[in-house]
Structures are given as structure tokens and as C-alpha cells.
Amino acid sequence: MEVRSEGIQVRCDKLAAPVIPRTRLRIWFIRICSSIVLWTCLVQLVTVSELWHSHLISGITSRIYNVAQVQVPSQADYESIVHAPPPLVPARNYTSNGFLRVSCNGGLNQMRSAICDMVTVARFLNLSLVVPELDKTSFWADPSNFEDIFDVRHFIDSLRDEVRIVKRVPKKFGRKYGHTTLEMPPVSWSNEKYYMEQILPLLGKHKVLHFNKTDTRLANNGLPLDLQKLRCRVNFQALKFTPQIENLGGKLIRMLQEKGPFVALHLRYEMDMLAFSGCTHSCTEEEAEELKRMRYAFPWWREKEIVSEERRTQGLCPLTPEEAALVLQALGFGNDTQIYIAAGEIYGGENRLAQLRTAFPRIVKKESLLDRDELRQFQNHSSQMAALDFMVSVASNTFIPTYDGNMAKVVEGHRRFSGFKKTVLLDRRKLVELIDLHHNGTLPWNEFAEAVQQSHVKRMGQPTHRRVIPDKPKEEDYFYANPYECLCEGTECDDLLGHHNTSVVPP
């Protein structure tokens, strides 16, 4: 090596001596030779490793890799493991007959029930359901979309074994590709036979069907058990509020529970309800005229000329705050009772609540319990505000609605599902009669209180069958107020509801 290098060095010196010093050439030569030797050794090692299948080297490298991979989890990683969502249920595999779009109409709880119905319709027609569109044109003019109120990811994932839910209709089914959407409102109170025989054939031509009204479009009774249970599954499990609503609603509930038991009073003495029902009892002439103007301003409110007192004696008006105070006292609630007003703005403001507050000083509302900043994100979003009231009402020790509207019915059903929690279902027709007798001095307080209590002994949300009225679905008990098919199983249902309690009213 030395001889060769010296020879090379001599030749290099002869050529380069006049320009470059001898020491610099030697350093460069050593570097080049070292690099050649190193590369040669590396290539031979790789070759030998491949020929011998060196288990030693691979074992060492494998252990090094595994050690590098096993790291101590961070706090965030630990929390994600502990609170990891449950595994998704297997998706249902079916050939879709088309897409179902739905535009829900009404307030939050009317839309909620409609969504449950439309999932069920999509299921037995083998349709793909588009995430429902919420009403933005009603009295409340709430701009909220589905994902602003409900957890859309949970909604889609939790029902994937029943129906395919998508966020939008694929572009290939648009007008550009020759497809047209059929828009129509389905017939109210219809059973699965109507949808199978009248609606399904339409999807042969129109791959996209748009139901532009969804309220009460599925029958209360007479549906197969699996469809009734699916309606419940959507209602009680799939329709989960957004984390923002859940967190704030949970805070409200904790604040109330820390101060003891509480009553949720759904005081439906709000401007829209009074205008819609034509109930002006105890209103001034100016207020009555204002409510009448509102009723005429909404063309889809069909009744215009309404006799208020006649409507009231029929039990078709929400109780006034003054009437509600009397009823609560007669039912035995003391002045130390904590009462949460589950409602929007009371017509007449705080002045109309004066008598109720005098009788029950511990009255609170979400606006008085929460900071203004906490409610700011929900302002001008009536459905999101209603969601907070809904959560508190379901969690309350006692729930008392002063009118049997959609919220009252849906909350009643949730409370039955939660173990038949106490829900006082007011007999307004009887109450108005008793209140008037008490006011004119005919019925002393003790007799009034006893009569009120006796008339509500069996109206506390106990287990019972729904009332069925053949050919009069509007007068039947509402499915979502008492979904008894979902509350018990088999013979247990008979024991719970009573063998002879069919609640069928003959035609």
C-alpha cells in the first residue's frame, strides 16, 4: 500500500509539484482512500447480512424500534383512552331506493318528533336520509341549522345500523344530470302502508324526494313494534344536543339541584301561543288587539275569529300566571318551593309574574341564573334556548306544563322513559271551572284545594296505555308523550300498564 501510494504520490508530484505543495496532496489522497475503504466495508456488510439473514442485527434493530415506539402516554392521550367513544355499530348494508330530504316545520320539539318520524320512514322505505333542514320561517325566525342544535356526527353514527344518513344529496342526482326533486307534504297520521303504496313508487322516477312538511306525518298507533322502537331510539339516544348546549344545560341543572328539589313550570303564557290560540283572558283591550293582529299576520294559522272565553271554558287556553299560582298552591307546593320557569318571554313581562312571584319567591329563570356572557351565543336562537329549558325540565323533580303543546308532550315522554318521573298533567277544563267558582266565592279555599288535588290523582305521569280513538288520530294521545312500547318488555308491560287498561275509546 505504501509503495503504491508513494508511486502515485511521485507521479502526482511530477505533475502537480509546480502548483500544489506535497503535504496538501497527501492529505487529499488519504481522505479519498479512507472513503473508498469505508464504502467497500459497508457494501460487504450489507451483502453478508443478506446472505446470513443476520437475526442478531434484525433483533437488535427491532428492539430499538419497539422501545422507541412505547412511550409514556401524555395526559391528553390518557383522557382520550379513558373517554374514548364506544365502537361504531356495523353499518346496515342495503340498496338505497333514493334520497329523502325533509324540511321540518314548527318549534324545536315539533321538529324533534318529526325527525324521529322521518328516520323511521327512511328506514322502512330503504332510503338514504339527508340531514334534516330546520324551520327558519316560523314565528321565532331561528336561523339555527341541525348541527347548531344537535350533535350531527353522533346522529349519523348512532343510527348507521338502521339507515344511511348523509349531509347532502350527491351532485350526480342534481338537475344538471337530469334528475328532478319531487316536493310534497305527506298525508298526516299515515301508517307504513301509505308510505309503501303511495310514496315508494314515486321514487322510481324521482330519486330525490323532498318532504316540505313533517309534523304529525306518521300515525300514533297501529305501527309494527320495531318501527315504534326505532322512533324511540332516535328520540332518546340519537338526538343528542351539541356539547355547548349540553354543558350549559348541565350547569343549570347542577345550580338548581345544589339548592334542593325544584319544579319546572312550563309557563306557556307567551305571545305566540296566546295569539295562536286566541286566548286573551285577563288581557287588556290593547293586548287583545295586538294578539289578534299577530294571528292575522300568519296566514298558516287558519283560525282567525276566536271567542276567547269559549275557548277557555273548553280547557284550550294556557293557564295565566295568576291561575298557575293558585293551582300550585292548591296542589300543596309551599312558598319555599324552588320553581324554574321553563319558557321564553312571558307576555306582559315581569308585571304578569308579580302574583306568581309573591306566592313563590324562589322563582328563577335561565336568564337570572346564568351570566349574560354565557347566554350570548344563544341569543336570538329560540330553539337553542328551548333546548336548555328542555334539559332542565326533563331533570326536574316535578314537571308541570300549563299547556299541552309539543314541548310539554315530548318532555312528558322523556320523563316516562326516565322512570315515570312526576309530571302533573293539568286538567285545564276542570281547573278553569274550579278557579271561577273560587273567585266568585262559591268554593272556599279548602274545598278548592281538595278538588284540585282529587282531580289530578291519576294525572301524575303514571304508567298507562295511550288512548286510541279510531279514525280520530288528532284526538288520540300523542305517541311521543307516552311511547309505552319502549318503556317495558313483554309481560312486564302488562303488569306495569294493567291487563285491562287498553285505553281504547269506541268510535
Image (spheres, rainbow, N blue to C red):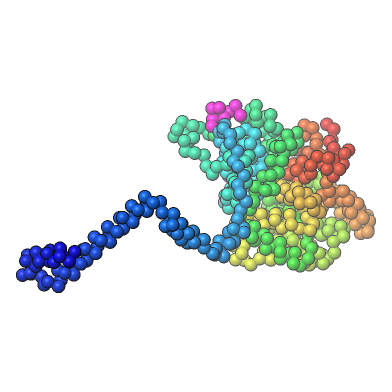
Is 384 placed left or right of 414 in the picture? left
Does 152 sit left or right of 257 as displayed?
left
In the rendered structure, the answer to whether residue 202 lies left or right of residue 445 reads: left
Question: Residue 196 in the image: x percent, y percent?
Answer: 65, 29
* On-image quarter of the N terminus: bottom left
- Whether residue 182 is situated above or below residue 235 in the rendered picture: above
Looking at the rendered image, the quarter that the C terminus falls into is top right
Residue 417 inside the magenta-drawn segment:
no
Q: From the top left corner, tell me how far across and down residue 227 is, in percent.
A: 70, 37
**205 part of magenta stretch:** yes
Q: Nearer the viewer, residue 88 or 365?
A: 88
Q: Main secondary structure of the magenta part?
A: helix
Which residue is pictured at 78% across the width and 65% down the height? 260
As drawn, is 302 to the left or to the right of 310? Answer: left
Q: Is residue 84 above or below residue 260?
A: above
Quadrant of the rendered image containing residue 23? bottom left
Looking at the image, can residue 495 be seen?
yes
| Residue located 28% across and 61% down the image | 38
Q: Is residue 104 visible?
A: no
Task: Report the magenta residues as a range.
Answer: 200-207
Instruction: Say which of 432 and 104 sits in front.
Output: 104
